[in-house]
Amino acid sequence: MYLLGFDIGSSSVKVSLIDGENGNCIASSFYPKQEMKITAHRAGWAEQEPELWWHNLKLALFDVLKESKINPESILSIGISYQMHGLVMVDKNHEVIRPSIIWCDSRAAAIGDKAFEEIGGQRCLTNLLNSPGNFTASKLKWVKDNEPELYSKVYKIMLPGDFIAMKLSGEIQTTVSGLSEGIMWDFKENSIADLLFANYGFSKEIIPEIVPTFAVQSRVSASAAKELGLSPKTTISYRAGDQPNNALSLNVLNPGEIATTAGTSGVVYGVSDEIKYDPQSRVNTFAHVNYTKENPRLGVLLCINGTGILNAWLKRMVGENLSYEEMNQLASDIAIGSNGLSVLPFGNGAERVLNNKNIGSVLSGINFNIHHKGHVLRAAQEGIVFSFKYGMDIMQNIGINASVIRAGKANMFLSPIFRDTLAGITGATIELYNTDGSVGAARGAGVGSGYYKSFNEAFSNLKKLETIDPDNSKKTEYQDAYNNWKTKLENTISE
């Protein structure tokens, strides 16, 4: 029996097929081969067409079915991972009303800040565990205020993964975990967040049916089965935002465990069984995939918008003829601290860790007689790691401590400089595993469909590929470089 995983990112859509019996990935593919288009009509905006996700999913799935040569009837279930916080609006005919306002769009930050003041900061933090901030609910309020003719057509709102599930099944559904990431779930009342809906003037009727994260939620419709080459017997039995799903992929489900990813954006995600929140909402608390009111499992999430996207931008600007491996080699020839050159990697919109400020990316301390391409490349990777460290210090203040960090061996974690710097500045051991979001989603489908009887069974063949221990002999060098970087960050924020 086989399990399918869909990972709906903002850069690409990846599809993986695993053999349920042994957990091995049989085939995988992603589209587009270049980064998916993000439209920015104004500075700080970011939109994507939901149908673009569906189009690229079909292309990737076609490759997987062709490569694997399996009978689609043998695919038991589908799991979906998706880019968090995106807003998808549909009318009564299930037609998309406008492009999705995605995770890195910062237009609604001021709306969320205003609601935080009007509702009361302590009430927001106690009930919602966050400020409404720039999350999905605030994005919808922006549409209500600025595009009332479109808002009037709204039948249901969804997150990106809910949209894909709708395209697969024809049914519109969501989860508590998904609602919490949009700041639409009241943890104190265990219900849709009436206090925020009242402030924003929303009807609860726009929220889809709430289904469990792990369960047979729906089945592939006859029309979708024909379009995709699948069987209408196949179920959809798991969905989660990309960061909770990344944690699931790494079997990070229990208090004290930490998962990290560094793709377009970078995330540190720690699991807690206690209500924990940052008073300034610089890191955010959501319902984890295995959350229940009786057995709370909460994910405390640090997000840095500008991580892999910075590295990709540098490749286009200064390393167009270089591979990422060659870029890493140039950077590795430079000493820790990049001879005083610092990069603040905040060029992908407002950053929650900086109180929703949009300071842009900054290259600081450049000396034309000393610095060359290698310095810039190393300073960029150090800047990304140091932004992680800056946020992890905030997480530590609310009880999330990193002694071991798990990650998939992908994206920025393919860089030895990135891995060594992260271990060196945090003092944490880094463990790299043979997994990714689409494989994790497939395993999640195995749990939700009942094929796997437990999480332990689902992750029995998860393999550790590499362990990176901190080099304590370089601890002072890393700390000095970080202190220099942090000073430049604080000076930039205060300007």
Image: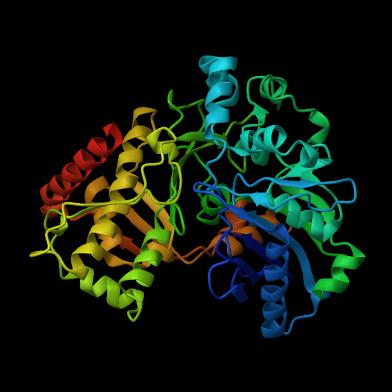
Q: Is residue 453 something that shows in the picture? A: no
Position in image of residue 448 (x %, y %): 72, 52
Q: Which residue is drawn at 91% across and 66% down?
A: 222
Q: Quadrant of residue 394?
A: top left
Q: In this view, does 40 lie above or below 31?
A: above
Q: Which residue is drawn at 69% across and 75% down?
A: 59
Position in image of residue 300 (x %, y %): 48, 37
**Quarter of the figure that contains the C terminus:** top left
In the image, 420 versus 485, the foreground residue is 485
In the image, 296 versus 206, the foreground residue is 206
Q: Residue at x 58, y 40 (%)?
A: 288
Q: In this view, does 413 lie to the left or right of 213?
A: left
Position in image of residue 361 (x %, y %): 34, 50
Q: Is residue 229 left or right of residue 320?
A: right
In the image, 351 versus 464, the foreground residue is 351
Q: Is residue 358 above or below residue 21?
A: above
Q: Residue at x 61, y 72 (%)?
A: 31
Q: Is residue 432 something that shows in the picture? A: yes
Q: In this view, does 356 lie to the left or right of 297?
A: left
**Quarter of the figure that contains the N terminus:** bottom right
Q: In which quarter of the image is residue 183?
A: top right
The mark total stands at 0
In the image, 438 versus 307, the foreground residue is 307
Position in image of residue 276 (x %, y %): 47, 27
Figure coloring: rainbow
| Residue lying furthest left | 369
